[in-house]
Image (cartoon, grey):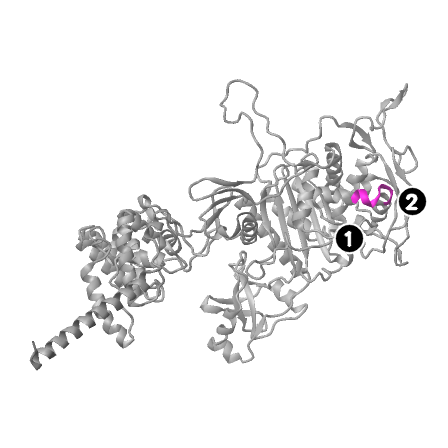
């Protein structure tokens, strides 16, 4: 039957509509398939833990640092205070515990508005629940597209089926970015307020809940008024929901918003070099996961000793710097008007003092007599007279000079300060365990993070000599042996003569070993090394850890090889602990976020340690370290190095009144100065030198700079400690040699002289020179060195 025209058009229109619907449906199906083909699996979040910071602690529990890509402290849901969670719910999603992942009304309104926003190129609206935000933050990108919003809604629904509400809220509160270098509420509480979560006040909880909308918009310092307004609105919402009372809300609103001036990784800031060295060693051990695994890391650091080490080294370097004169102002303002109107401050404040010197202030010289005005209106006054004389002896001061000053403790005047250009290091280590209790790698980490303790390869000079003497004692020499100290000239491989000199340009004839080490006598040491053989000395250096490689030439006996303060300090521990080479370490223990131990420095097994006490003998744990030296040899060297402190080049350290041993070291042309000192329980290495290895200046020996630094540090380290003597091996034999009680291996000790009727029994007393000679004596060189050296070790 023929259709009428009107009906025909209706039929055509119907077909067109159905076709359009089919095409639209097909298009939507294709779009949906494309949109969701790579949809992540929400079930993956059941075991998900966001990246968290590895926190680093000193041995006493002091937090000293963090390592992280995202600065986060993961806090389980049951440890999050209810009022903190309620604050975030009030701010972001007060129906969180009622909806199924999507707030249908809010989401629909946002989608309708977003159609217009997308057409106009405007930013899309949120309307997201906390569940949707978790889906976006963890599983999706942050692209502001309609497609992503649909994905977000679908994933939110799936999340609600996979995780409990508590798990979702836990993820949200630990994942979210809150500004101030903080991911998650745990890090934010610490960075903003310096508190743990349970310590937060209601007002502080509400402020943290204000931050997800935009941390910069509600910055507590730059936008304090907006931040407080947003905080107070959240407090009002909490009261409206019945989670807090109106009275509590008003009380919290009345609180000021006070935060830390800047987020800090740790309140203890004296261990920057140590913390960075731990990071590098941690990455070598644990790999990149160190920065995201949320590990607990306990180190060997003793904060009291670390602070003492930092202060001692900084003050020692400043004293060296002062001995070598005022170098001049670090800036200058030509126009006096600039000094008067304050415009100089912009230039002054660009030059900050070392962050470790918190008492230093930038100032401008306002008069030739030393008047100064501090930046930021912090005061004005005069430079101390002695500092003016010090400055005028070299560069002097002029009106308009920009300088650093520090308020004097003993007068109203200011002390003139300058940042040293010399540098150094200090390492303190327990000799029996290898635990590094203090490490300072330079004057200021903020000025240079080059760690001179572990990275600076330098010649140790005479600080190497104990290893020469130890090798001799391991190869037939005894403390009664005599070696000739006399002029010696040797030919090197290139034909040049080498005549090692003593520091005082004198020679002393036949000397016992002790005298050569106590007085750091070069010519005698070279003769001793020549007799023993450099190959054996090199082997000792390698076994004890001084170096991995050393040429077997005689110059090395005077410290011409290179090592680091860290390695040399480690090597000296063998003289204290009975001849063992311990493994030096900074990391004691590492646990993962579940508390499982994944690294322990002490790998010894303790049999029966966990069996409980049953009256039997207590478990015996083997000593740490490989035996690299006879225990008697180690004690003999320690005894001789005690003589260095009592009568030798480090005699000033004897004023501390404790049993101490040590050896100074100064290299050719005074390029490096050392002191390696120790007590029965602590080995300390001090190094001073320029980074470009230039000369420190005439007379700058190990006794001049490093020994006073060692003394300043040890005053604090020894405070309250008993005066324990160095422990001798049980099988050591003793005899008097020239009035000094010396230790010997059994069978090598000198014999007691037969008694006479008039004198009775007499102890052995070596004549010096010309009397009875010890078991081994060398009277001179027998062969030349294999190459010409470039150094003479000094003190």
Residue at x-position 32% and y-position 56%: 134
The answer to whether residue 77 is left or right of residue 17 is: right
Residue 271 x/y as whole percent: 54, 51
**Is 536 covered by the magenta stretch?**
yes
* Residue tagged 1: 560
Q: Give how far across and how far down residue 397 sits, in percent.
A: 61, 71
**85 with respect to 690 (left or right):** left
Q: Which residues are magenta?
A: 530-537
| Whether label 2 touches label 1, CB < 8 Å | no
Q: Residue at x 51, y 76 (%)?
A: 339
Residue nearest the viewer, comparing 376 with 101: 101
Q: Secondary structure at mark 1?
A: loop
Locate residue 565 relative to residue 588 in the image: left or right. right
- The answer to whether residue 258 of the structure is visible from this angle is no
The answer to whether residue 195 is magenta is no
Q: CA distance from mark 2 to mark 1?
A: 21 Å
Instruction: Give the percent coordinates (x, y) of residue 500.
Output: 85, 52
Sequence order check, earlier mark of 2 and 1: 1
Q: Residue at the front extreme?
A: 1
Q: Is residue 58 visible?
A: yes
Give the residue number, with chain letter if any, for mark 2: 780
Q: Where 65 falls versus 1 (above or below)?
A: above
* SS of the residue under disc 2: loop
Q: Residues within 10 Å of mark 1 (few under 14, many from 20)?
A: many
The answer to which image quadrant residue 335 occupies is: bottom right
């Amino acid at each position: 039957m023929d259709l009428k025209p009107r009906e025909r058009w209706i039929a055509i229109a119907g077909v067109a509509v159905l076709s359009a619907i089919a095409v639209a449906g097909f298009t939507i199906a294709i779009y949906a398939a494309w949109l969701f083909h790579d949809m992540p699996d929400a079930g993956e979040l059941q075991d998900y833990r966001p990246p968290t910071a590895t926190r680093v602690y000193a041995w006493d529990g002091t937090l000293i640092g963090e390592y992280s890509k995202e600065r986060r402290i993961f806090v389980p849901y049951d440890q999050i205070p209810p009022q903190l969670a309620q604050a975030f719910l009030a701010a972001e999603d007060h129906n969180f515990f009622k909806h199924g992942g999507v707030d249908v009304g809010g989401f629909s309104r946002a989608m309708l508005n977003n159609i217009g926003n997308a057409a106009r190129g405007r930013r899309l609206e949120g309307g997201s629940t906390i569940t949707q935000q978790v889906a976006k933050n963890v599983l999706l990108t942050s692209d502001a597209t309609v497609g992503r919003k649909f994905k977000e809604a679908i994933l939110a629904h799936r999340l609600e089926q996979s995780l409990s509400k508590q798990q979702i809220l836990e993820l949200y509160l630990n994942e979210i970015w809150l500004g101030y270098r903080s991911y998650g509420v745990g890090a934010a509480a610490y960075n903003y307020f310096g508190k743990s979560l349970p310590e937060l006040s209601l007002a502080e909880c509400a402020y943290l809940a204000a931050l997800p909308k935009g941390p910069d918009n509600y910055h507590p310092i730059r936008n304090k008024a907006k931040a407080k307004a947003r905080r107070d609105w959240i407090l009002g919402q909490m009261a409206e929901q019945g989670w807090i009372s109106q009275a509590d809300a008003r009380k919290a609103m009345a609180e000021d918003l006070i935060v830390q001036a800047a987020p800090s990784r740790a309140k203890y800031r004296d261990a920057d070099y140590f913390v960075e060295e731990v990071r590098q060693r941690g990455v070598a051990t644990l790999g990149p996961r160190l920065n995201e695994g949320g590990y607990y890391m306990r180190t060997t650091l003793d904060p009291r000793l670390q602070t003492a080490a930092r202060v001692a080294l900084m003050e020692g370097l400043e004293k060296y710097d002062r001995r070598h004169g005022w170098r001049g102002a670090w800036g200058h303002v030509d126009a006096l008007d600039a000094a008067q109107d304050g415009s100089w401050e912009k230039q002054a404040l660009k030059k900050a003092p070392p962050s470790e010197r918190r008492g230093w202030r930038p100032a401008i010289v306002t008069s030739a007599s030393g008047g100064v005005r501090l930046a930021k209106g912090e005061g004005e006054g005069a430079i101390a007279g002695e500092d003016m004389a010090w400055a005028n002896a070299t560069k002097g001061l002029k009106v308009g000079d920009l300088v650093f000053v520090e308020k004097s403790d003993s007068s109203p005047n200011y002390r003139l300060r300058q940042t040293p250009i010399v540098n150094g290091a200090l390492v303190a280590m327990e000799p029996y365990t290898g635990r590094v209790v203090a490490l300072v790698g330079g004057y200021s980490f903020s000025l240079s993070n080059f760690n001179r303790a572990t990275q600076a390869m330098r010649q140790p000079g005479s600080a190497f000599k104990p290893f020469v003497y130890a090798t001799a004692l391991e190869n037939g020499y005894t403390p009664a042996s005599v070696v000739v100290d006399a002029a010696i000239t040797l030919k090197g491989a290139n034909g040049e003569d080498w005549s090692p000199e003593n520091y005082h340009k004198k020679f002393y004839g036949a000397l016992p070993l002790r005298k050569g080490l106590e007085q750091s006598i070069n010519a005698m040491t070279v003769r001793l090394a020549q007799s023993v053989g450099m190959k054996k000395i090199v082997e000792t250096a390698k076994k004890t850890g001084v170096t991995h490689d050393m040429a077997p030439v005689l110059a090395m006996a005077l410290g011409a090889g290179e090592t680091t303060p860290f390695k040399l300090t480690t090597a000296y521990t063998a003289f204290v602990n009975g001849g063992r080479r311990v493994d030096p370490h900074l990391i004691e223990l590492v646990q993962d976020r579940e508390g499982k131990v994944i690294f322990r420095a002490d790998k010894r097994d303790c049999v029966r340690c966990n069996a409980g006490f049953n009256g039997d003998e207590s478990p015996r744990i083997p000593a740490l370290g490989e035996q690299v030296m006879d225990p008697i040899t180690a004690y003999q060297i320690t005894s001789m190095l005690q003589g260095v402190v009592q009568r030798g080049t480090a005699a000033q350290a004897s004023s501390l009144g404790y049993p101490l041993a040590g050896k100074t070291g100064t290299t050719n042309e005074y390029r490096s100065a050392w002191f390696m000192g120790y007590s029965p329980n602590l080995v300390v290495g001090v190094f001073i030198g320029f980074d470009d290895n230039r000369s420190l200046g005439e007379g700058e020996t190990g006794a001049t700079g490093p020994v006073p630094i060692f003394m300043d540090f040890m005053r604090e380290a020894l405070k309250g400690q008993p005066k324990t003597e160095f422990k001798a091996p049980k099988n050591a034999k003793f005899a008097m040699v020239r009035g000094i009680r010396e230790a010997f291996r059994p069978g090598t000790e000198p014999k007691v002289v037969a008694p006479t009727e008039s004198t009775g029994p007499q102890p052995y007393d070596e004549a010096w020179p010309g009397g009875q000679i010890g078991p081994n004596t060398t009277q001179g060189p027998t062969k030349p060195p294999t190459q010409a050296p470039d150094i003479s070790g000094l003190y």
